[in-house]
Amino acid sequence: MSGSWPPQDLPYLTPENHRITSRRANAYNCIAWAAGETYRNWWPGPKNSGYWPAGVPRSVTLAAFMQAYGTRGFFACKDGSLEPGIEKIAIYGTGDPGLEAPTHAALQLASGQWTSKLGKCEDIVHNTIEDVNGPVYGRVIAFMARARADRATISNPR
Amino acid sequence: MGRPYQFIQTNNFTVMLAVYLTLQLTDQPCEAEILSADSDECIQIVASCSGTTALVVDKDAADQVKLAADQSKFSKLTGRWKAETSTLSSITEMVLNPAYQNIIGMGDAAIPFILSQIEAEGDDPDQWFWALQSITGVDPVHEEDAGNYRAMAQTWLNWGKDVGYEW
């Protein structure tokens, strides 16, 4: 099965390094997916355009994104290596070194593979963090980690 | 592109024929628009992609042509926007896309089309809310629903009905 994304946006994805795990959905984006939510889009746009944790600056900066994930128990870590009992996320960005704007986030599975929601397209499981590098998401600019719990994805709580 | 067709007539049929020929004879979008209103009764409409010109002496007809042109423009822009932003998670980049900005630039004319589009998208509405907010200057969405597109869509559809839009 091939995904609905334009191949040129994700030039390193091949049939061998990923599999599709959901249908297309506008209901949530990668930032929400990495935080464990599937009923809303996270983004620090103007008020009400997307969800953003209360008290976190609404700016598209790495600092704001790390602070946002911090509200869900994540803390900065040095790499994306697999560690028992630890759940990691990779934050991607584009731009000049040190000034990158966040574009994407992926979540590490207990297997060591990663899962990404590709914009409005499908969720995928991919083998490495580099598999979704490219002109849209750039590359990984930070890693965060928290204790791995039995993960429950939060669908609409209402 | 075929030779420009010149229509000088006074009835709806001729105007619609002009637009129809524009759409049939070219593979470019029909950009019919009212260019001038020489008097209350005489409105010039130009389908700009083919040079098709219709001189209309019927405001209702002119409105119909403009509505059809706006609908066509909205549909094409929507297709472009969705195609060009499908892998983006950034709402900021999504709404800065030129096609989306052109939809915002359509102003009030776009609102019924957006509301209709939201309704058609059913349980999985897209990010139309920024456009609605930009055009109308209002934001009926409750803070607790921010980012919840399904709830936001319902709020905007209710708003549209409340203020009298039909789609």
Image (cartoon, coloured by chain):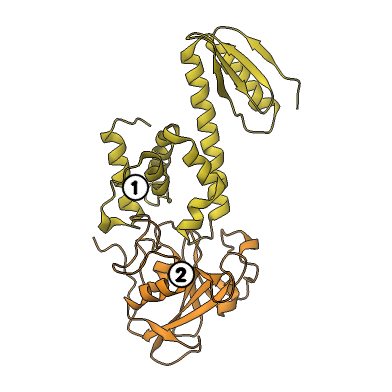
Q: Is residue A131 above or below residue B113?
A: below
Residue, disc 2? A61
Residue reaching furthest to the left: A158
**Chain identifier matching the yellow colour in the rendered picture:** B
Identify which residue, B155 or B101, lies in the foreground. B101
- Kindly indicate whether the residues beneath marks 1 and 2 are on one polypeptide chain: no
- Residue at image x 38%, y 32%? B167
Is any atom of residue B152 visible in this view? yes
Q: Residue at x 28, y 33 (%)?
A: B163
Residue most extreme to the bottom: A84
Element type at mark 2: loop
On screen, residue B127 above or below A112: above
> Label 1: chain?
B
Q: Amino acid at mark 2?
A: Thr
Q: Colour of chain A?
A: orange
Residue A70 in which image quadrant: bottom left
**Residue B153: mark in rendering:** 1
Mark pair 1, 2: CA separation: 28 Å
x and y percent of residue B62 in the render? 51, 17
| Rendering coords of residue A14 (x, y %) | 64, 71
Instruction: State which quarter of the image contains the N terminus of chain B.
Output: top right
